[in-house]
Image (spheres, helix red, strand yellow):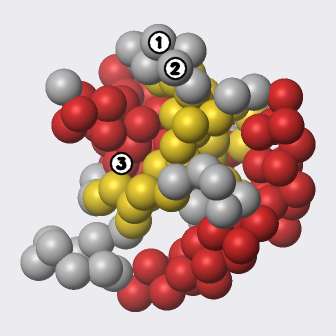
Amino acid sequence: MGRVLAIDYGRKRCGVAVTDTLQIAANGLPTVRACDLMAWLVEYCRHEDVERIVVGLPMTMRGEPSESARYIEPFLKHLSRVMPDIPVERFDERFTSTIAHREMIAGGLKKSVRQQKDLADKTAAVLILTDWLNSRR
């Protein structure tokens, strides 16, 4: 069984998370600049057996893609051309950033640490992947 990789795509930074080989738990990976993401993914998938990529899809409260979803579409098209053998799945990411901040507060992180946007992006990616895993069970 291969790993599942999740991306919290942002215009500047992307949070990334990955499962273990048994696809039981999600762990955060270093945040990647959006302009470097494709090269990073190609390199990561060259060294790890990635069976699927899950990309967070920002949704409105009505269940429709939000305005920011339009920034993800070009990336998804490029990803399918560069890595055609790895299935890409979109997954609702509503509230993941809010939940990530709440989790950091609940974890007792100081305000100065919580303001590090890369940590919030990484946490959001872990939440997306965890929710995706739970939806498959």
SS for tag 3? helix
Q: Position of residue 128 (x, y in %)?
A: 39, 43
Q: What is the count of numbered marks? A: 3
On the picture, is 47 further left or further right than 89? right
Identity, as a three-letter code, of the amino acid under mark 1: Leu
On the picture, is 75 further left or further right than 99? right
Identity, as a three-letter code, of the amino acid under mark 3: Thr
The image shows residue 22, relative to residue 130, as above or below, that is above
Give me the C-alpha separation between circle 2 and circle 3. Answer: 27 Å
- Give whichever of discs 1 and 2 has the lower sequence position: 2
The quarter of the displayed image where residue 69 is located:
bottom left
Residue shown at 57%/27% (left/top)?
3
SS for tag 2? loop
Q: Position of residue 112 (x, y in %)?
A: 64, 34
Give me the C-alpha separation between circle 1 and circle 3. Answer: 24 Å
The image shows residue 64, relative to residue 51, as above or below, that is below
Residue shown at 29%/37% (left/top)?
131
Q: Nearer the viewer, mark 1 or mark 2?
A: 2
The residue singled out by tag 1 in the image is 22
In front here: 123 or 82? 82
The image shows residue 57, relative to residue 50, as above or below, that is below
Give me the C-alpha separation between circle 1 and circle 2. Answer: 6 Å
Identity, as a three-letter code, of the amino acid under mark 2: Met
On the picture, is 106 further left or further right than 21? left
Q: Position of residue 127 (x, y in %)?
A: 39, 36
- Give whichever of discs 2 and 3 has the lower sequence position: 2
Residue shown at 20%/37% (left/top)?
135
Disc number at residue 1?
A: 2
Q: Are marks 1 and 2 in contact (CB under 8 Å)?
A: yes
- Give whichever of discs 1 and 3 has the lower sequence position: 1
The residue singled out by tag 3 in the image is 96
